[in-house]
Image: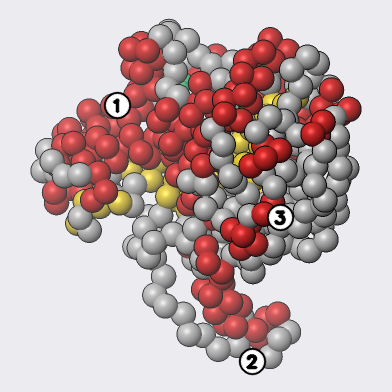
Amino acid sequence: MSSSAVMAVAEVSSPSNAKTRLLQSSQLSFSSTHLYSLRRSAFRPIPTTQKARISCSVAPNQVQTPIPVQVEGPKTKSECYGVFCLTYDLKAEEETKSWKKMINIAVSGAAGMISNHLLFKLASGEVFGPDQPIALKLLGSERSLQALEGVAMELEDSLYPLLREVSISIDPYEVFQDAEWAILIGAKPRGPGMERADLLDINGQIYAEQGKALNSVASRDVKVIVVGNPCNTNALICLKNAPNIPAKNFHALTRLDENRAKCQLALKAGVFYDKVSNVTIWGNHSTTQVPDFLNARIDGLPVKEVIKDHKWLEEEFMENVQKRGGVLIKKWGRSSAASTSVSIVDAIKSLITPTPEGDWFSSGVYTNGNPYGIAEDIVFSMPCRSKTEAELLAEKRCVAHLTGEGIGYCDLPEDTMLPGEM
Ligand code: LMR
C-alpha cells in the first residue's frame, strides 16, 4: 500500500466571503465588561475578495502568492484599543505588503495553561511564519472569562505585529466562525490518580457540541487538532458531529508522545535528540499506545543497532513513554502544559510543511482505508507524511489515464517507506 494512503496532506482555504462579525483588522480588541459587547464593538468586514490558499502539500514559499493586506481607511479612536491605534496603521507599514492573507485560528480552552504557552507562539509567527498575519479567536467558559480577558491583555501588551485580531467568547458558534484552524484544548484535565478514559463522557459532550459548531460555521477546509483528553475519542466524536468537514482534517495530538519517545531514545543512546527520527506512536494517547522503536532510527541507523539493551527498549522505554503524562501530573500536580504546546506547534508545522525525505510524524487520524489492518472508523495514531505539491502533481501525471487527462507517465522519486511497507 502506498504511503499516500496515510499521508497528512490537507488544505486550508480562506473563505472568499467577508463576514461582518470579525473585529477590525487593525487592532486587538476585547470586551472588558461584557462578553458579547464584542458584537457591539466596531465590526467591519475585512475585504477578503481574493481567494487565498494555504496547503500543507506545498513548500512554504509556494504556499501562495503574497497578497497585500487590504485595509480600510484610518480608524477612529473609539474603534482602536490602546497603542494599536498608533502602531497598527497598516498603510504605513511597508512590510504588510508582502504578507499573506490573514488566517483565522480558533483555540478552545484558551485561558488554560497549554494555551498560555501556545497563543504566544502563534502570535509571534513561530508557527505559521513571519509573513502570516493571524486572527486569534479564543473560546473559554463562563468561569474562565476573566482569565480569558487577562490572556487577551497580555497578547495586547506583547505588540506582536502579526496578530491582527483577538476576540473572546464562550460561544463556540461565534469563535469557530470561518475558522481555518481549530485547536481544541478545552476539556476537564485528569488529576492525580485518574486515567484519561475517566474523562470520556464529560469531555465527549464538549467535543460533540464543538463538532456541531465547527460543522455549521467553520471554513469547510478547517484543520482540527484535538488536544483535550481522551483526545483520540474526542476527535472521533468531533468529526462525527461535523459531517460537512472532511474526516481527514481531524487530528488527535500524539506528537507529544512522539517527542517524549525521541527524548527517551536520545537519552539512552547518549545523542542529542535531533538525531532521532522515524518514531511512530501507534494507537491511543493513553497507556496502551505503542511507541515504535523497531522502525525508529538514530543517526539514520535502526535503533536496535545503536541501543543494544533490547530489554530496556521493550520494557522501560515503552513504559516511560506510555506513563510520562501521569508521572508529570504527579510531579506538577497538574498535567503537562509547556511541552504539550510545543508538540502542538510541531504538529501544525508537520501539516503545513513537506515532511523531510525519509522521515514521518505521528498523528491520530481517522482510520478510513488504512493499510495496517487497523479497525475502521476510529481515530488511531499512525505514521503520516505531508507531501509537496510537486510530488502530488507528479503522481497526478502518473495516473492521467485514469483521470481522463491523457496518457499517464511516471517520473516519481523513490518514496519513503512507512512501517509495514519494508
Ligand atoms: C499528557 O500526556 O501529558 C496529557 O495528555 C495529560 C495527561 O492526562 O496525561
Q: Are marks 2 and 3 in contact (CB under 8 Å)?
A: no
| Kind of residue indicated by mark 2 | Ile
| Kind of residue indicated by mark 1 | Glu
Q: Which of the two labelled residues, at mark 2 and mark 3, occupies the earlier sequence position?
A: 3
Reading the image, the residue beneath label 2 is 407
| Kind of residue indicated by mark 3 | Lys
In screen coordinates, is 300 left or right of 408? left
Reading the image, the residue beneath label 1 is 319
In percent of width and height, residue 343 lies at: 44, 38
The reply to whether the residue tagged 1 has its Cβ within 8 angstroms of ligand 1 is no
- Secondary structure, mark 2, is loop
Label 1, label 3: how many angstroms apart (C-alpha)?
A: 56 Å
Q: Give above or below for 170 relative to 391.
A: above
Q: Which of the two labelled residues, at mark 1 and mark 2, occupies the earlier sequence position?
A: 1
- Whether residue 202 appears in this view of the structure is no
Label 2, label 3: how many angstroms apart (C-alpha)?
A: 50 Å
- Secondary structure, mark 1, is helix
Label 1, label 2: how many angstroms apart (C-alpha)?
A: 52 Å
Of 287 and 115, the residue lying toward us: 115
Residue located at (54% from left, 16% from top): 189
Residue located at (40% from left, 30% from top): 339
In screen coordinates, is 324 left or right of 15? left
Q: Which of the two labelled residues, at mark 1 and mark 3, occupies the earlier sequence position?
A: 3
Give the label on residue 167, or none. none
Give the label on residue 91, or none. 3
Query: How busy is the neighbourhood of tag 3: few (under 14 within 10 Å), some, or many (20 plus)?
Result: some
Residue placed farthest to the bottom in the image?
407
Of 8 and 302, the residue lying toward us: 8
Picture quarter with the C terminus: bottom left
Q: Give above or below for 145 relative to 47.
A: above
Q: Are marks 1 and 2 in contact (CB under 8 Å)?
A: no
